Amino acid sequence: MSFLGEIVEVLGEGSAEAGAREGVEVAAKEGAEVGVAEGASSASQVIDEVIIDGAQGAGKEVEGGGAIQQEAQEAMEASQKEMKDVVEKLEKGEPGALEEANAIESSWKTKFKNVWAGAKTFGGFVGVELAKGALFTAGMKALELVFTKLTHPSVANVAGGPGAPATPVDDRRLKIIQVINKSGQILQEALDTWSKWQAAHYDNRDSYGTISAAGFDLSIFQILQNGISSLGDQRDKLVPLVSKAKQDNSLEAVKTLLTADIAYAKAVADLNSHISSNMKTMTDDGLPTRSTEVQAAYSTLVAASA
């Protein structure tokens, strides 16, 4: 199944999840120690809430400085609108929606192979990556809500859940998911920050120099984009594991997700280290590094697997 098809299923039954969340919020007020996750009611709402900071005229620069030029901004918005349109069809269960989602994702792969065709194409890539990251984060919050209702009887009862007594296994599952979500937010913020910075500095891409490898001169700016793209692909491959954990509620499925997430976090940490060590021309121009935060997120995930 496509990324969009699967993440819509993970978030699925938006109105039901929203109703459950209202009940959870009531229970959380009665016992704040539960630590309930918040989440959007639908995938289309998540896309609506993606913020493109650094847009020209918005009066706000991206982190590290710089504003996103109009052409790139419009492409970011257009790619997210395209995504939202097909997501809404998936949510409604319209005939042919899944095939349309597959076709759109296939078109992204083709289009973004030539991501350097211009600011418009690059902006489209960044827009897609920001929205996919937001959807994955929302899907993980939905998963946390599932295990919160299973683990805390009072929350489950108020939210319409079964209200079965929590077991040590239940609690272990929830704790792992909470660790994944806390770390995941840090990791996604790093990717979003780097993507937005690149969108704001696209016109300067050739000024940051090259690295020679295997007889080729590779643009440092392009190496970073390739790294971000690879990390996005790795994150997207976690979605089937999220879906599996939501479907069968087993500790084994949650541990499998954790193992894959640790590998993903390690890859983000590796790219961050590469930025710090080998991309000085860009860090000198404001490209943020997240060494402390990203390393802490990775270490926390590893500790959760013990």
Image (cartoon, helix red, strand yellow):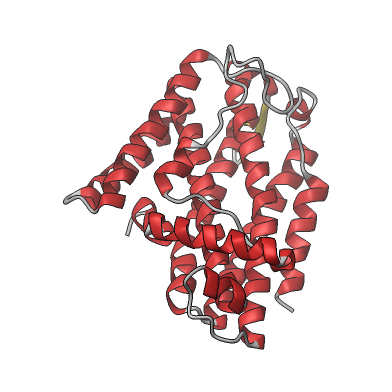
Of residues 297 and 167, the one drawn nearer to the viewer in this rendering: 167
Q: Quarter of the image for the C terminus: give it.
A: bottom right
On the image, the x and y values in percent for residue 261 come to 61, 63
Residue sitting at the far top: 57
Query: Relative to 155, is 86 above or below?
Result: above
Residue sitting at the far left: 95
Q: Quadrant of residue 197?
A: top right
Of residues 73 and 125, the one drawn nearer to the viewer in this rendering: 73
On the image, the x and y values in percent for residue 102 come to 28, 49
On the image, the x and y values in percent for residue 236 come to 48, 54
Of residues 253 and 219, the one drawn nearer to the viewer in this rendering: 253
Q: Quadrant of residue 120?
A: top left
Q: Quadrant of residue 303?
A: bottom right
Q: Is residue 138 left or right of residue 167?
A: left
Residue drawn where x is 67% and y is 25% of the image: 62
Q: Is residue 289 left or right of residue 217?
A: right
Query: Relative to 42, is 209 above or below?
Result: above
Residue drawn where x is 73% and y is 27% of the image: 282
Residue sitting at the far right: 292
Disc tally is 0
Q: Quarter of the image for the N terminus: give it.
A: bottom left
Q: Is residue 121 visible?
A: no
On the image, the x and y values in percent for residue 220 come to 65, 31
Q: Is residue 210 visible?
A: yes
